[in-house]
Image (spheres, rainbow, N blue to C red):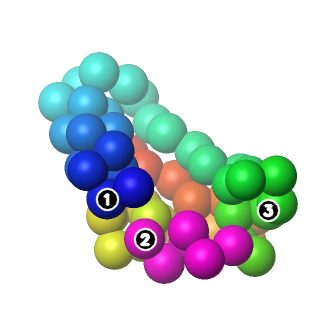
């Protein structure tokens, strides 16, 4: 999962997208999932309902 997250972060930071928000992971809210830690470690900001990555 880490290599895929790194590719997404690189894409957003290179201007490929204005932002990327993750609200659900494997069918559950991302804030309740183990993936939230990986997202934050990758550079996403933790919000009350989602993780957001901006360039």
Q: 16 above or below 42?
A: above
Kind of element beneath mark 2: helix
Whichever of labels 3 and 1 marks the residue nearer the N terminus, that label is 1
Q: Quadrant of the N terminus?
A: bottom left
Q: Is residue 23 visible?
A: yes
| Residues tagged 1 and 2 counted as in contact (Cβ below 8 A) | yes
The answer to whether residue 9 is magenta is: no
Kind of element beneath mark 3: strand
Q: Which residues are magenta?
A: 33-38
Q: Residue at x 49, y 39 (%)?
A: 20
Location of residue 18 by image quarter? top left
Graded by Cα atoms within 10 Å as few (under 14), some (14 to 19) or many (20 or more), the crowding at tag 1 reads: few
Q: CA distance from mark 3 to mark 1?
A: 19 Å
Q: CA distance from mark 1 to mark 2?
A: 7 Å
Q: Identify the residue under disc 3.
A: 29
- Percent x, y for residue 39? 45, 64
Whichever of labels 3 and 2 marks the residue nearer the N terminus, that label is 3
Location of residue 36 by image quarter? bottom right
Q: Is residue 25 left or right of residue 44?
A: right
Q: Is residue 45 left or right of residue 17?
A: right
Q: Nearer the viewer, residue 13 or 4?
A: 4
Whichever of labels 1 and 2 marks the residue nearer the N terminus, that label is 1
- Percent x, y for residue 4? 33, 44
Q: Residue at x 61, y 49 (%)?
A: 22
The label shown at residue 2 is: 1
Q: Identify the residue under disc 2.
A: 38
Q: Is residue 13 visible?
A: no
Q: Quadrant of the C terminus?
A: top left
């Amino acid at each position: 999962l880490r290599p895929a997250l790194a590719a997404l972060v690189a894409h957003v930071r290179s201007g490929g997208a204005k932002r990327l928000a993750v609200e659900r992971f494997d069918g559950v809210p991302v804030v309740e999932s183990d993936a939230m830690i990986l997202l934050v470690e990758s550079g996403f900001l933790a919000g009350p309902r989602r993780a957001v990555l901006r360039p």
